[in-house]
Image: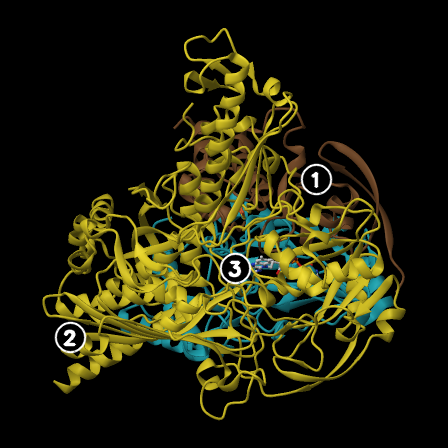
Amino acid sequence: MIPAPFSYFAPDTLEEALSLLGEYGESAKILAGGQSLLPLMAFRLVRPEVLVDLGGIEALSRYELAGGRLTIGSMVTHRTIELDHRITSRCDMLREALDVLGHVAIRNVGTVGGSLAHADPAGEWLAVALALDGRIMVTGPRGNRDVAADGFATGWMTSCLSPDEIVTGVRLDMPGPGTGSAFEEVARRHGDFAVVGVAARVSVEGEAVTGARIALAGAASTPIRAHRAEALLTGTTLSGPDLDAACEAAASETDPVADLHGSVEYKRRLARVLTRRAVSRAYRRASAPA
Amino acid sequence: MKQVGEALPRREDGRLLRGRARYMADLAFDDSLDAIVVRSPFARARILSIDASAALAADGVVAVLTADDLVGVEPALTRQFYSLTPAFIERHQVFLGPYREPVLARDRVSRMGEPVAFLIATDRRAAEDAAELVEVDYEPLDPIVDPLRAIAPGSDLVVSDVPGNIQASFHIIVGDPTSAVEAAERKVSGRFRIGRSVGSPIETRGAVGIPATGSEPLTVWSSTQIPHILRAYLAEFLRCPEEDLRVAAPDMGGSFGGGIYAEELLVAFAARLLGQPVRWLEDRRENLANARHSRDQIIDALLAYDTSGSFRALEMHIVQDCGSANLFGLTLPFNIASHARGQFAIDHFDVTGLCVLTNKTRNTPVRGAGRPEATFVLDRLVDMAATDLGIDPADLRHRNLIPAREMPRDMGMLYRDGAPMVYDSGDFPDQLRTALEAFDYWGKRRRQDEAAGSNLALGIGVSSHVEATGLGPHETARVEIDDSGTVVLTCGSNPHGQSHATTLAQVAGETLGIRYDRIETRFGDTGLLERGGGTFGSRSAVTAGAVVHGASVELRRRILDLASEMLECDPADLIIRDGYVSPRGVPGISVSFAELATGGAPLRAEDEFVPPTVTLGSGTHIASVAVDRETGVVNLTGYVVVDDCGTVLNPMVVDGQQHGGVAHGIGNALLEEAVYDEGGQLLSGTFIDYLLPTAADVPDIEIIHRPHPTPLNTLGVKGAGEGSTASAPGAIANAVVDALRPLRIEINELPITPQRLVELIRAAEAEQVEGLAGN
Amino acid sequence: MTRDLHSIVLNVNGDEVTVRVEARQTLAGMLRDQLGLTGTNLGCEHGVCGACTVLLGGRTARSCTLLAVQANGRSVTTVEGLAADGDPLHPVQQAFADHHALQCGFCTPGFLLTTIEYLDEEPEADPDSIRERLSANLCRCTGYHNIVAAVKDLLERRTGR
Ligand SMILES: Cc1cc2nc3c(=O)[nH]c(=O)nc-3n(C[C@H](O)[C@H](O)[C@H](O)COP(=O)(O)OP(=O)(O)OC[C@H]3O[C@@H](n4cnc5c(N)ncnc54)[C@H](O)[C@@H]3O)c2cc1C
Ligand code: FES
Ligand code: FES
């Protein structure tokens, strides 16, 4: 299983990378960690003629936590974030999501930007970005743009990126005081892609929910936000019927794609069950004294 | 020095731990070419044309072989794996149709992945690049995927000369099952489906053919379990005497199922044709699509019993999906039949087995080979009966186990080798008691409900199995002392993780009075030993152990005879210690093995062991599970094994085999499934979709040995390699059913995926709601 | 298409090496075919089985889903780098031998390196996390029981528990 031949470039700067992409157009592909791309190339399901490796661009490997906002360069690895206690202690959702994203050996090499750009419907990062009001930062020949995570993925493993654009990073809102978060998923084995995963963020004042974000992975052809469920939760105290209604809504907002590991029905059920678990835990965390 | 039975450290480990093993892909040969197989993308199609011209013109391509190029050789395999005796055929109403499996497809393909062309290039990269250029024009046909449809009247045929798609069948009747079923007060029955799974060693297969040179015959290195058998098939294929061929196995990264594969034949043909070594290495997708598929039965079964809980009769009808060719004849369904009654006294027994052809990959025996399937069905029936009678399953089991005093017990049928099937030894009730105690079964039962959480249900399941092991026909070993005084042990059975170099050396070492780690061992090379059996069916410890013992005893006799002449002392008064022979009580006088070996006559003993028939290993497993009622996820929380594999050669090694077997059984129970769609396309073609159990899917496993040595061989050994696979699915399925007992679900299908379980739970809940509404 | 060749320099098991590789050569392919380090085994070539695990800059990585060129300038440790021939086994190797944590040995190099990183990163780890951590690597022979026992033993010896 050897990839079809290609030419390899390792630019030092974003400008160089952009000009390479401009030059080779659709025949080029960006290489980040390669943890998704290289298996596809080994199967020869993807066969770019040119690979542009972003690994040498230092600017993309930085991240910063400042003023309640986490900004992550696209080439930062999953593991780098996972091991930064300042971040994971502030965001349970991120900690829980990273713990089940592949295995350490994958997280050591795979990148945040690669995951987002790959737009796997079951990917944890895009779901987390949806739940944390993420903005995905993109640069291209027409300049920089900022895309809301909600709407970034446009279909099965496709995004609004054009082939000459590069994801440079993502900005996430960290849960503040009075806000709790959680990530729940069912995968067939530890480290496998989620059958369904749910990221929930809940803000609470007194006992009432003042705001909620619910994002689901594996529940449609892209990660999605459950807007109706969010609205139904807001203003409630998470009583049984309210929570039931929100979970039903979340399930009905899904449009699962059946595969070997779950039928449409099963995935819908998981959406409902895991939404309940994630929201309840996030609510408890929001209500717990800091 | 006592060695047999000791947990002596493995001699294999040093090399393996340092990365110095030589697996198939690590072997390097000068001027070696790399081959790749061009395979059918269709389950069933006519081949209209093959155009290799573009591939042949590509960089580095040396040859592209198709069926038309296989001149002077047999174009297909036609001999099934085991021969059956006429008495067996008559007694069990055996029908065997023709078997024919093309080495390369000619006019038609009958499964996805079937080899169509063999492309040879200067290196792997060139081969992979060029393989894409071979143009094959197919006319796809509707495939036959479902075995029940394959045997329905009017079905298309997978192979034109196998009418009804039934390649083989048998019918076993013991006692008077019809009357017994009629007379029985109660019955449970069901249709059970055992999913197709794949052996999946972590090393994929590979083979290298090396042309004959002046001194060396045409040689094939292959990651095979059965070098001598492969040589016989190669000789038939190449139409040459076996003496003109050598087959050897390198270090192997597991195997878990034997067989003969086209690629092993093709590398030999290509090497002979091209005069250069030709290497073929399988990739994982090829492995999952083509190698060691197994299980895959639909079994209708019925257990009849009395209200007292006494089992009366068992009926089974087995439909074995064999895939497109049936190399192994009756093996799988007959294994199911042979193990179907497990540890229970069931006097009346009726089993039919059908080997059905479909447009899927050939089915082969893989670790357990029929035993897990048989055990799962029986375990489920027993627990269904327990529920029906309102008795704890452990109690019901106890009432029906064959008591130790009834051993040996003739089971009223023949085994596959033609000998009467006799349970030779064992104490099943003791095994169950030991397991229940070790597991704290009754204590856990009492605490079961308190321990459950809101979403979690806890369950306990018991399984017991028997395992006929140590199948013949024969095994050969030679033990000798070379000029330097080194003891050299050569055996036909070759290891792929089973620690032969340790355990067999322990047997020889103890007999010969020399430490096992000073014995040189050589395995799996027809160049070293004219005859040999192989490693399959949990046979090595039995057959190889026995034959190494036999040869060692003979060599010891010769050593003592020779030494008695040199030391002028009666052989009976001599002792051997650390490679020196001396008169008892006179350690000062001695003669070394080296001195004896330079004496002239070769100090060598060769033995062949032909087991009278199989011996009976057995085991009882108890598993506990936590079931997430909402998601259907099952977690194993505890696991106990009590086993009887007779004399234990090395407990550390045997425990390791048991652990591995349990994990394999867990895979079969919960995770592993080779899935074909209706078009005969394999959907589980990568390790992303074919799910092997990981460390997180397997619990700690407690193992307790209760050995009852067999009288059938001098060592008293029974096999251990497969049995633990047998009980895991039944124990787990019963535990899951137990966890959900208020819902009264039945699990009749493996693997128990979360989705399937949720469907069962939902259906049961709906029924309960309906029941309430109806009241 | 012509072969796109690159010269890369990396440190392998303590030695600096310069290798010319085709762009599509994986790190595993380079180690095995060009440096003769065949201890790194390939079980799936698509990132799942972990047999090919090496340490890249001290951290585990799948060498089958990493291009050799991506490792340019980095340091790589393979199983051959754990104990020189003739030297005693590395403590993790020794623990695997002591606990019979290997049978066919094909998965073993990957497990050794996964274990080394684990002990290195989390010397105080809770033994309950062992199974999840080891789930990165597949073994078909051992049922993991003895691998887990070996790692537990190593952890306990570290923490003196
Ligand atoms: C065994 C295994 C298990 C895994 N399990 C999970 C899991 O559970 N959850 C999960 O989310 N992922 C999982 N992954 C995938 C892993 O997380 C990858 O790291 C991730 O999906 C892609 O990141 P990468 O850096 O490796 O990207 P690459 O593989 O290099 O690239 C992926 C795609 O994104 C494009 N791309 C990469 N970077 C950019 C950029 N900056 N701008 C524009 N396009 C870009 C590439 O061209 C390519 O098409 C698993 C992978 C493996 C091998
Ligand atoms: S060979 Fe690299 S993960 Fe399997
Ligand atoms: S020891 Fe054989 S795969 Fe692990």
Q: Which chain is yellow?
A: B
User: Circle 1 sits on which residue?
Assistant: C76
Which chain identifier belongs to the brown chain? Answer: C
Chain A appears in which tint?
cyan
Q: Secondary structure at mark 1?
A: strand
* The C terminus of chain B sits in image quarter: bottom left
**Badge number at residue A117:** none
Position above or below: B145 against B490: below
Chain identifier of the residue bearing label 3 in the image: B
Q: CA distance from mark 3 to mark 2?
A: 38 Å
Q: To which residue does mark 3 refer?
A: B199
Tell me the subunit letter for badge 2. Answer: B
Answer few, some or many: residues within 10 Å of disc 1's Cα (few below 14, many 20 plus, some between 14 and 19).
many
Q: Residue A252, percent across and down?
A: 42, 80
Which residue is tagged 2? Answer: B186
Residue visible at 52% across and 81% down in the picture: B145
- Please tell me which residue lies in front, A285 or B385: B385
Q: Residue at x 59, y 44 (%)?
A: C110
Q: Is residue B407 above or below residue B262?
A: above
Measured as percent of width and height from the top left, residue A16 is found at 84, 57
Report which quarter residue B173 is drawn in: bottom left
